[in-house]
Image (cartoon, rainbow, N blue to C red):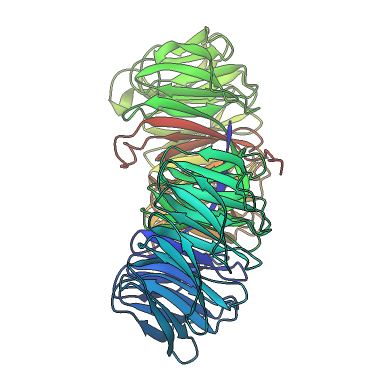
Amino acid sequence: MRWLAKFISSYACDGPVSAVDWGPAGRWLAAAGGAYVKVFDTEAKKIVWSATHGGVVSSVAFSRDGSRVVSASGKSVQVFDAATGMLRRRLPHTATVNAVAISRDGSFIVSGGGDETTRVFEVSSGVERFHVLHDGPVNAVAVSPDGKSVATGGDDPKAQVLNAQTGAVRSVLTHNGAVNALVWSGDGTRVATAADDDVARVFDAGSGQLRSQLRHEAPVNDVAISPDGAWVATASADGTSHVFNIHSGAERFSWSQESPIRAVAWSKNSRWVGTASDSGALLFDPVNGQERCRIEQPGKVHTISFSPNGQYLATGGTDDIARVHSVAAVQELCLIPLGQGNNGGAVALSPNGRWLAYAASNRAATVTDVLDGSIRCVLAGGGKDEAEFSPDGEWVLTVSRSFNGTDVCDAASGALRCTLVSSGGRPLARWSPDGRWVAMFTNFSGEAWSSQWVSVKNAKTGTSRWVIEAPMTTDLAWSRDGKWLAVGKWDSTVWILDARNGTERIRIDQNDHVNSLAWSPDGALLATATFTSAQILDPADGAEVAHLANGVSRQGVLWSEDGRLVAVVAQGVATEVGSWLHVFDTETWDRRFAMRLSAASQIDWGGNSRRLAVTAGYGHGVTVLDPLTGVVDCHLGQGDGVISTKWNADCRVLATLCSPLYAGLGNKPDSIRVYDLDAVQPD
């Protein structure tokens, strides 16, 4: 088991994200990506403004009062109005600017660049206050908390502390290699540095005296001092992060990641340390070194920053996207590797969420313990395409879409209970609400539409209760009391059958091919989705109670367990390009909300209706949201190639089936990930 940070939102940038910084209120986020600076509203989840530079933007920062955004790119520093993006100042260098910082009172800016200078500019006038020449490019600059001093470091093996008014050298901080990063302590008495000579150091800012140091086995890329001023955290190319005492240099602990660590940051209350590496980002406890959660995202992560309230983390890297995660984490119960290539298949969870069934045509179906990923049993019957637990969780229904049959197996031992049909192409199979019966649609005689049948079979013995000829069946749905079976047809009809004997109650004409059906919990209404619309029908007389929406293709319709809501996924609506999730109130039939999706999607509603899972297109993971309001709780599986999901009965446990190759994300191993969304992580 491990914990994963809740992914909240993402923001497209125009190149690899080199830097992110929060506004002082914690709502706006500035990101440097490619040749652009962008500011995003993380509450409204939208872009506020975007501005271009003459080259790749290397650094970005908000002023302390939130009124200005400063950035470094090309041969200049640019100062923007934080609210509008209007350019206020362009401050020149003679070569590429590598770093920029703004004083706390917002009165001056310090910058360093490839022209081997550190420059200080007045914000109000843009006038250069002074510049200092170095013996190599300047890589890092920082302003002391009181605004009286500037620290600067670069490729020459020293850092300097300068008088912020005159540029006079206050102290020299000696190194044996290039300085990559530096930072002031909160009280302004110490400067910590990260250098290419594999050492992180802490100096007395006034005298330049070395106070403490910690040696790595490769260059140190970044360094951060805890807000309480007691500890220093490092990020190194050797793949480790260390926390050591700022006064003595005594190491508190070290942490290893699978790849070079590029950046490190403290939460504002000194409670957590975050690291950004080539293999993702990590949040850990600086007291004991225990991992709190991982931040998984595609590509290398270059930068990481805590929001002012410490509740969120912003990250950015080589996938050209800035992301916001919550420090509150989701527990990943298990990760089940499925091997290389497109395995496809289907997953199912037992009602209590403890067991997971996986079926695929190229392997035997299995039941796995989600707490440790161990296999509980192998189900009889060989390769299958679908699996579903019985309502009591004691049995698993496995279905083959080719000619490998449909079986009921013991969920504990895998033993065959009965075979419902030994062959037949393109079957559908649905458990009855009491688990005693299975409704089936099967083609017994090849591909001819005229040879297809609907039946209800005894789940214990496999014997037929009744069988009727029903060509072109596309979906089956039991009423919640088990008395009625709805049959959706390609010929644009819906049949309502008596589940006890197959007698037709009514045949209802639809406007197009039917592809999805869902009963209301009380059995009084039936939702249908056709290729052109979604509607609510009275199953007693076939009358249309409500017309929900029009569209080119309705990919699915679901009714919430409490009967208050109906959800529909649409693709290609005439006035709404792309895919949309629509949720309707069943009292008024008004649309509660609509959510735009990036590609053809699936929806999955757990048994108690409190969460809705939406797969937002191949490679885009799954979005978990509140179905009453549309408010997003979290996103999971970004970049995993999620192709389907399954809830357990109470919407606590969610399983995702991931196939990167099938999703067009390259030939990466397939996997199943199982999450517990109600687990509470102790602080």
The percent coordinates of residue 294 (x first, y second) are 53, 42
Q: Is residue 436 above or below residue 225?
A: above
Q: Is residue 360 above or below residue 262?
A: above
Q: Is residue 522 above or below residue 414?
A: below
The percent coordinates of residue 75 (x first, y second) are 31, 77
Q: Residue at x 48, y 12 (%)?
A: 378
Looking at the picture, tell me which residue is in the foreground, 248 or 356. Answer: 248
Q: Is residue 612 above or below residue 423?
A: below
Q: Residue furthest right?
A: 682
Residue 280 image-quadrant placement: top left
Looking at the picture, tell me which residue is in the foreground, 623 or 302. Answer: 302
Q: Residue furthest bottom?
A: 125
- Res. 87 in view: no
The percent coordinates of residue 361 (x first, y second) are 36, 21
**Residue 415 placement, left or right of 89:** right
Looking at the picture, tell me which residue is in the foreground, 41 or 313. Answer: 313
Looking at the picture, tell me which residue is in the foreground, 465 or 152. Answer: 152
Q: Residue at x 29, y 71 (%)?
A: 55
Residue 449 image-quadrant placement: top left
Quarter placement of the N terminus: top right
Quarter placement of the C terminus: top right
The percent coordinates of residue 398 (x first, y second) are 47, 19
- Res. 378 in view: yes
Q: Residue at x 57, y 25 (%)?
A: 370
**Total of numbered circles in the picture?**
0
